[in-house]
Image (cartoon, rainbow, N blue to C red):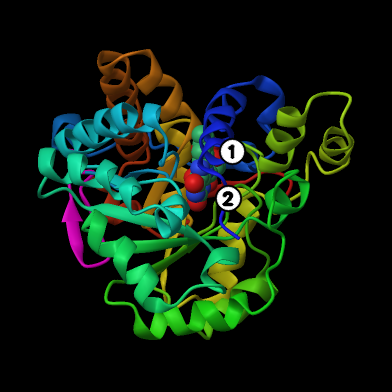
Amino acid sequence: MSEPTEQFESRKRDHIVQALAGRNQASGLTGFEQVRLIHEALPEVNFSDIKIDAASLGESRKTPFLVSSMTAGHVDAIDLNLRLAKACEKRGWLFAVGSQRRELNDSAAADEWRQIRAAHPDLSILGNIGISQIAKISTSDVERLVESLGASAMIVHCNPLQEVIQEEGTPNFEGSFEALNRLCEELSVPVVVKETGCGFSEPTLYRLKRLKIAAIDVAGLGGTHWGRIEGSRSGEESFAYQLSETFKDWGVSTVESLLNAKSTAMDSEVWASGGVRSGLDAAKAIAMGAKVVGMATPILRAALESEQALELCMQRIETELKIAVFCTGLKSVAELHNNDEVLQWENH
Ligand SMILES: Cc1cc2nc3c(=O)[nH]c(=O)nc-3n(C[C@H](O)[C@H](O)[C@H](O)COP(=O)(O)O)c2cc1C
């Protein structure tokens, strides 16, 4: 049975409010605190020559950054997504939209994408759908989502903790691995698999390695936490809140997930997200093997403030990455990528 539009819209609005609340950030748990990039006091390079351009999914862009999947399918999302799309086009970031689930039952939801596409015909935009949804629909249903957005890839998100704590959640994941396999074989665009803030263990990555996935975005523990968010949405007196307290630190940290991806020797690209809050965090993730680095809540916060605040936030993150490259004595993100020699571990 399809979900009423009002319930969907109200949940999406709640998510924006709750993502910004301090309680719903699993701060200090990413693992980036235990990683250092080794300082080089004698870099043989001019800072203004540092290159941060990067390639992923067969495309080159000015930066390795991604605005992670956030919102879609409600009135306020249109302006927000237009603002994000404009900034991504200008600065050379990848742009992922939030779950297109509503469009499965309401074709009018595709209007949002037509507006974005009309304003930004050449922008690389990634679609998004939940893994618990794909088991119930056909590849041609997902193909329609790709077409309406003009998506260059489709992200499938895994969010078991969120679905099980969310009062109206759909925690039935039966058949989802086989559905994902089918999608990877049949869809016309590359498939990216991501978590939503709980990361990936090594055994899960070994299972995913068997599929034709183009990229894994680890979306690990340490940033926005969807167990906490669903508890907060229901209120402090609620059953869901109690559950969210118990599971408030659940997940595999972003750094641990990246190490798991390395030891699994994934054939796909590895992307990093989950609690990435600066260009320095991003630099560490790139040195650990990430091709693309995504951020959600920090970008949301800036975008809600103003177009200028968003631009400044993106500029700061890019400059921090450049400084990290410069001060490790390297010249480019390409040299930083998967570079163990500049990494130092504390207590690991
Ligand atoms: C308001 C909001 C809505 C989100 N909606 C989606 C979604 O629809 N699909 C998805 O895959 N992830 C969604 N996410 C999760 C993010 O893409 C990301 O994986 C997670 O928030 C961790 O990143 P962060 O710590 O940088 O916020 C959402 C995040 C936010 C903040």
Question: Can see residue 290?
Answer: no
Q: Quadrant of residue 280?
A: top left
State which quarter of the image contains the N terminus.
Answer: bottom right
**Relative depth, front residue between 173 and 157:** 173
Q: Secondary structure at mark 1?
A: helix
The picture places residue 276, in percent across and down from the top left corner, at: 50, 38
On screen, residue 272 versus residue 335, left or right, reads right
Indicate which disc residue 3 carries: 2
**Relative depth, front residue between 37 and 233:** 233
Asked if residue 36 is positioned above or below residue 185 in the image, the reply reads above
Q: Amino acid at mark 1?
A: Gln
Q: Amino acid at mark 2?
A: Glu
- Contact (Cβ within 8 Å) of mark 2 with mark 1: yes
Say few, some or many: other residues with alpha carbon within 10 Å of mark 1 (under 14 / 14 to 19 / 20 or more).
Answer: few
Indicate which disc residue 23 carries: none
The picture places residue 157, in percent across and down from the top left corner, at: 53, 58
Task: Residue at 60% x, 75% y: name it.
Answer: 176
The picture places residue 180, in percent across and down from the top left corner, at: 51, 77
Q: Secondary structure at mark 2?
A: loop
- What's the magenta region? 50-62
> Which residue is disc 1 drawn over?
7
